[in-house]
Image (spheres, rainbow, N blue to C red):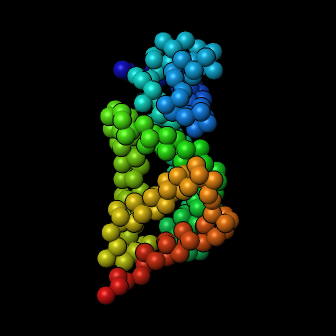
Amino acid sequence: MPTRTTPKALATREALISLAAEMFAKRGYLQTSIRDIAREASMTTGAIYGHFRNKAELLTEAISSRTESDLESIPETQVGPPQHVSVLYEAALRYRERRELRSLILQGAAAAVTDDETRDRLRDEQLAHLQRWIDGYEANRIQLGIDDAVNIRDAVLFSWAAEVGLGVLESLGIEPKSKKTWADLYSRFGRSLALPAEE
């Protein structure tokens, strides 16, 4: 399906992504239908299908959009500790702002267990962001002082697993003691990437 590119169509698409993200995170992905979103947006279901092939596409677009705005827009500084340490620290300090993103990923993961299309779309979406982060670390490994023995792919997966795992704990009412302690742990992890491997 071709993507509509007029300013009005793009604005409508963005508004639908934002609305769907909010509804999926609060009501649940499986419990929210395209008809529910259409009703809330004062649109027809046909108009929504003019922008998105199906609900799985809308979910992955919502997750991708939130990942970009909540994580990939963190500004980098040119002074202080290595960039990856400060970026990890700043991102971790703002973990509460990403509760909806984690909820969306959790909703998608639950649906992916029984829905192949949701699984495939969500997997591709997650891999695209993960690969962008891996490539960034690889390209700047020397500048960042990351030890040669560190497998950057696994390091990125490890830090992302902590983020996504926090979403599971939040759904059970379990959270870190404070933003500062959570951010300090991410900072320690970032600094550990410069350490040599244990014998």
Q: Residue at x 37, y 40 (%)?
A: 113
Is residue 67 shown left or right of residue 98? left
Residue 71 visible to the viewer: no
Instruction: Name the spot of residue 66 as percent of width and height, x first.
Output: 54, 42
Q: Residue at x 43, y 75 (%)?
A: 193
**Front residue of 92 and 119:** 119
Q: Residue at x 32, y 69 (%)?
A: 151
**Front residue of 3 and 161:** 161
Q: Residue at x 58, y 49 (%)?
A: 171
Total number of numbered labels? Answer: 0
Q: Quadrant of the N terminus?
A: top left
Identify whether 2 is placed above or below 103. Answer: above
Instruction: Name the spot of residue 69 as percent of width and height, x first.
Output: 56, 45
Q: Quadrant of the C terminus?
A: bottom left
View extreme (bottom): residue: 199
Identify whether 143 is placed above or below 166. Answer: below
Identify whether 61 is placed above or below 128. Answer: above
Is residue 148 shown left or right of residue 3? left
